[in-house]
Amino acid sequence: MRQWLTVCIVVEYNSLLVIIGFAAAFIISLFPKPTSARKIVRLRAAKVIDSLSDLYMDELKGFLLEAKNDDHTFDDNQLCLSTLG
Protein backbone atom coordinates (compact mmCIF):
# COMPACT_ATOMS: atom_id res chain seq x y z
CA MET A 1 0.00 0.00 0.00
CA ARG A 2 2.87 2.32 0.76
CA GLN A 3 4.29 1.83 -2.73
CA TRP A 4 0.90 2.68 -4.26
CA LEU A 5 0.79 5.91 -2.29
CA THR A 6 4.26 6.87 -3.52
CA VAL A 7 3.26 6.19 -7.13
CA CYS A 8 0.13 8.32 -6.75
CA ILE A 9 2.14 11.23 -5.36
CA VAL A 10 4.64 11.02 -8.23
CA VAL A 11 1.87 10.84 -10.84
CA GLU A 12 0.07 13.81 -9.30
CA TYR A 13 3.30 15.80 -9.13
CA ASN A 14 4.19 15.02 -12.76
CA SER A 15 0.64 15.83 -13.89
CA LEU A 16 0.81 19.15 -12.09
CA LEU A 17 4.13 19.97 -13.77
CA VAL A 18 2.72 19.07 -17.19
CA ILE A 19 -0.30 21.33 -16.65
CA ILE A 20 1.96 24.17 -15.48
CA GLY A 21 4.13 23.65 -18.59
CA PHE A 22 1.12 23.81 -20.90
CA ALA A 23 -0.11 26.97 -19.20
CA ALA A 24 3.33 28.60 -19.47
CA ALA A 25 3.62 27.64 -23.14
CA PHE A 26 0.17 29.09 -23.85
CA ILE A 27 1.08 32.38 -22.16
CA ILE A 28 4.38 32.62 -24.05
CA SER A 29 2.61 31.89 -27.35
CA LEU A 30 0.46 35.00 -26.85
CA PHE A 31 3.51 37.27 -27.22
CA PRO A 32 4.32 38.30 -30.81
CA LYS A 33 7.59 37.21 -32.37
CA PRO A 34 10.23 39.97 -32.44
CA THR A 35 11.17 41.38 -35.82
CA SER A 36 14.72 40.50 -36.79
CA ALA A 37 17.21 43.06 -38.06
CA ARG A 38 17.59 41.02 -41.26
CA LYS A 39 13.89 41.44 -42.03
CA ILE A 40 14.03 45.20 -41.36
CA VAL A 41 17.00 45.62 -43.71
CA ARG A 42 15.35 43.45 -46.36
CA LEU A 43 12.10 45.46 -46.28
CA ARG A 44 13.96 48.78 -46.34
CA ALA A 45 16.02 47.66 -49.35
CA ALA A 46 12.85 46.56 -51.12
CA LYS A 47 11.30 50.01 -50.58
CA VAL A 48 14.42 51.74 -51.93
CA ILE A 49 14.52 49.51 -55.01
CA ASP A 50 10.81 50.10 -55.58
CA SER A 51 11.24 53.88 -55.44
CA LEU A 52 14.26 53.70 -57.77
CA SER A 53 12.29 51.63 -60.26
CA ASP A 54 9.50 54.24 -60.19
CA LEU A 55 12.06 56.97 -60.84
CA TYR A 56 13.60 54.99 -63.69
CA MET A 57 10.15 54.38 -65.18
CA ASP A 58 9.34 58.11 -65.08
CA GLU A 59 12.66 58.97 -66.76
CA LEU A 60 12.08 56.37 -69.45
CA LYS A 61 8.57 57.69 -70.08
CA GLY A 62 10.00 61.18 -70.49
CA PHE A 63 12.63 59.99 -72.97
CA LEU A 64 10.06 58.03 -74.97
CA LEU A 65 7.60 60.92 -75.08
CA GLU A 66 10.38 63.28 -76.14
CA ALA A 67 11.49 60.88 -78.87
CA LYS A 68 7.89 60.44 -80.04
CA ASN A 69 7.35 64.20 -80.30
CA ASP A 70 10.74 64.76 -81.98
CA ASP A 71 10.48 65.26 -85.74
CA HIS A 72 13.86 63.98 -86.92
CA THR A 73 15.17 60.49 -86.37
CA PHE A 74 18.72 59.25 -86.04
CA ASP A 75 20.24 56.05 -87.22
CA ASP A 76 22.89 54.17 -85.26
CA ASN A 77 25.86 55.73 -87.07
CA GLN A 78 24.75 59.28 -86.34
CA LEU A 79 24.21 58.46 -82.68
CA CYS A 80 27.69 56.95 -82.35
CA LEU A 81 29.38 59.85 -84.10
CA SER A 82 27.51 62.48 -82.11
CA THR A 83 28.51 60.93 -78.82
CA LEU A 84 32.22 60.85 -79.78
CA GLY A 85 32.32 64.56 -80.26
Image (tube, grey):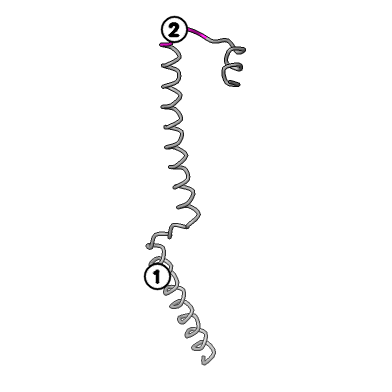
| Residue 10 % position (x, y) | 50, 84
For the residues marked 1 and 2, what is the alpha-carbon distance in whole angstroms?
78 Å
Labelled disc at residue 71: 2
For image coordinates 46% across by 77% down, the residue present is: 17
Amino acid type, residue under disc 2 in the picture: Asp
For image coordinates 44% across by 47% down, the residue present is: 44
> Mark 1 or mark 2: which is in front?
2
Verify whether residue 31 appears in magenta: no
- Left or right, 31 with respect to 14, comes to left
For image coordinates 45% across by 47% down, the residue present is: 43
Q: Which segment is the magenta one?
A: 69-73
Q: Secondary structure at mark 1?
A: helix
Against 83, residue 39 (above or below) is: below
For image coordinates 51% across by 91% down, the residue present is: 1
For mark 1, what is the residue?
Answer: 23
Q: Nearer the viewer, residue 77 or 69?
A: 77
